[in-house]
Every structure is written in C-alpha cells, then in structure tokens.
Image (cartoon, helix red, strand yellow):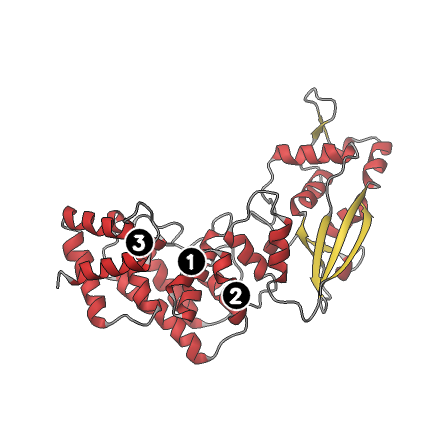
Amino acid sequence: MVRTDIRPMKLEDIYLKITDHTQYGISESFEIASAFQRGSEADGVWKLENKKNYINSLKSHYPTGIITLVKEHTSAGPWKVLDGGNRLRTIRDFMLGMFGIDLDGEGAMNWFDNFSERDKADFNTLLIPCQFLTIEQNDPDHTIADMYCSLNTSAEALKAGELYKAHGWKSDNWAIEVSKKMIGDSWDSVLSDPRIDTLRGRWISTFGDLSEAKRCESLAMMIGYIASAATSKLVNFDSKYTVNKKILSTLAREPSEDKKNAIFNKLSYFINIMSQIVLSKDMFGRTSRGIPTKSKVAPIWQPICENKMTDELGDSMIRFYNVHANNNPEVCAEYTYLLTKGGDNHATFAKINAVHEYIKSFD
C-alpha cells in the first residue's frame, strides 16, 4: 500500500528543492518529471495568464491546492512531481524573473526582484501543503497512472498518451520503451535493440518522419501496435489507455526472444505491405506525425496482428489498392462505404470482413 506523508513547506524551500539539488541533497529535492506532466517539461501547458493568476492567488494567501510528489521506496533520487507541476514551474519561473504580475490592476508589471524586502519575506515564507507518496514494493505497476488519473479528473481531461507516459515513469516497461524508441523525437529510451532502429527507419521511409505530439498521441497509438501484435487481437489496436492498461503489465518485463521476434516480425510485415501501396489520401487519409489513420489501415493490420495474413491476401491487397482503387473512383467510393458503414470511422470486425471480401472479389 502506498505510504503517505503530508506536511506544509515554505515556498522558498520548495523553490530551492526545485532549482538547486545541492541545498537539501538529491534525495530530498524535487524534480518536475515529464512523465507526469502535460506538455513539455520546461513549459507545461499553462498560459502566461494562468501563471499570473496563480502568483496573485499565492500573494493573496488564497488556497491553491496540495502539491503531490512521489518516489519508489528504493529510490535515492529526487521526489517526482505527480500533481502540481504547472504550479511549481510558475513559482520557479516567477522567482527567476521570467515574468511579472500586475498587483494593482492597472497593468504595471511587478517582478519578484523588485519586491520590497517585506513582500519578499512574506512570499518566501508562504506555506504550501505537500503530499509525499512512497510506492511500496508490492504496489501494482499501474498505481502511479491510477493516481495520476484520479488527481486530474476535475481538470482538463487527460489524454491516453499522458497516462501511458505516467505508467512508464520508471522507464522499465518494455512495451512502452519500444514505443518510445520507435517514435524517437522527444523520447529518450534506455532500450537498445538494433531491430527497433531498423523498423523505425523503414517506418519513416513508408509513412514519413515520426514525431511526438504535445499530448503524446503518437506514443499512445504506437503502443496500440505493440499491444495488438503481442496479444494477436485487433481489440488491442487502440490508443486508449483503458484498453491496454492490463496488457502493459504483462509486457512490463522484456519478453522472450520468440515473443519479441513475433512482435517485430508483424510490424515488419505491415511496413513491407504498406511500402508497396500507393498511399493516396482518398484511401488512407493523412498521416499525423508519421502515424497513419488507425481506421484506414485496420483492414491491413488486422490479419497481420491476428496471424491470419497470407502471401495471397497480401498480394491481393497490394494489387487492389494500386490497380483497382486508385484508378477507379467508383471502387474507391464502395470501399470507403464498406469501411465507414454506419456513419462512423470505427473499423469493426464486420466492416473489415466486408472490405476483405470486396478486395478478394477482384482476383
């Protein structure tokens, strides 16, 4: 069970714990960990107006909520900020002189360095409630993500990628690290496997440069590929955290070589087929940061991830998309109708089966 300790801290001490890890030692310092934050670690998602309002609330001695920090029971590193990252960035940036506030409502900016000694002392000694959570050995690996979701239910809704990011906060979940390695860009994975580098290069050649969105949508969808390849079930071909949360626990540790080969071979097979197809926007939509539209590629990924793809079906698909669909508006329209029947973009099994039968009818 998670161990909890709540105590108030002076604002000046919090600032030092964020900015100078030598003051109190690394184990008592704070790290605004990107694993638990929306947006970039440096900037978060607060606009300047949000920051000014927060500092004004502090100066007015209004209640501003509790700061929640977490670490694993064996960790000698700093406390990671689970909730309150935007508040702590704001405190840091204000005290560093990165923005000022309007104290009198007349538009004149007041900077922390220009405060009177009395105002500085009052600001520095403000007490902020802090909650320290220690993750114990027997706590499930999704404990952090569960708490993160719970803490943010009343704020702007969390994106799936942000929950995956929180789930993988220790950088020790194999499936998440593979996905980070595939996306690259802002992700820094400790995983080393040349097969992933090869797959990533081929993926980029087929779908374009991979990069991460502000709220980690690319990571979320790549995990959908990994999870569905691992389970051999299309239902896991989804970016939703609620769909793949339990699967991630089974893929936390590095799987056997046979399991890894099976996953990588499916991704390779998918890239191989997609690389031979003319990816018209009418048939496949637009890729987003190197990630193709899920519903558009589902008819191709489904037989691959579920071990049902044959060379004959693969050849039929390539021939259908390149020869028949791309050169015949009526074929393209019928194919789109079958895939979107019912007025939505959810690629159900019924729709995919109908598409497969349509493709085979051209052989």
Separation (CA) of disc 2 from disc 3: 26 Å
Please name the residue shown 50% across and 57% down the image: 241
Q: Is residue 83 left or right of residue 9?
A: left
Coordinates of residue 301 in the picture (x, y in percent): 32, 63
Q: Is residue 208 visible?
A: no
Number of on-image labels: 3
For mark 1, does the 10 Å Cα neighbourhood hold few (<14), some (14 to 19), or many (20 or more) residues?
many
- Which residue carries the number 1 mark? 238
Circle 3 packing at 10 Å, graded few (<14), some (14-19), many (20+), is many
Numbered disc 1: secondary structure = loop
Indicate the position of residue 330 as horizontal and vertical percent values. Answer: 15, 47
Q: Which residue lies under the disc numbered 3?
A: 296
In the rendered structure, which disc, 2 or 3, sits on the residue that comes first in sequence?
Answer: 2
3D distance between C-alphas at marks 3 and 1? 13 Å
179 sits left or right of 3 in the view: left
Of residues 2 and 88, the one drawn nearer to the viewer in this rendering: 2
Above/below status of 73 relative to 219: below
Q: Is residue 88 above or below residue 308?
A: above
Q: Say which mark, if any, is on residue 246.
A: 2
Residue 272 drawn at (x, y percent): 29, 66
Q: Amino acid at mark 1?
A: Asp
Residue 315 location, x and y as percent?
19, 67
Foreground of the two, 113 or 278: 278
Apparent side of residue 177 relative to residue 123 in the rendered image (left or right): left
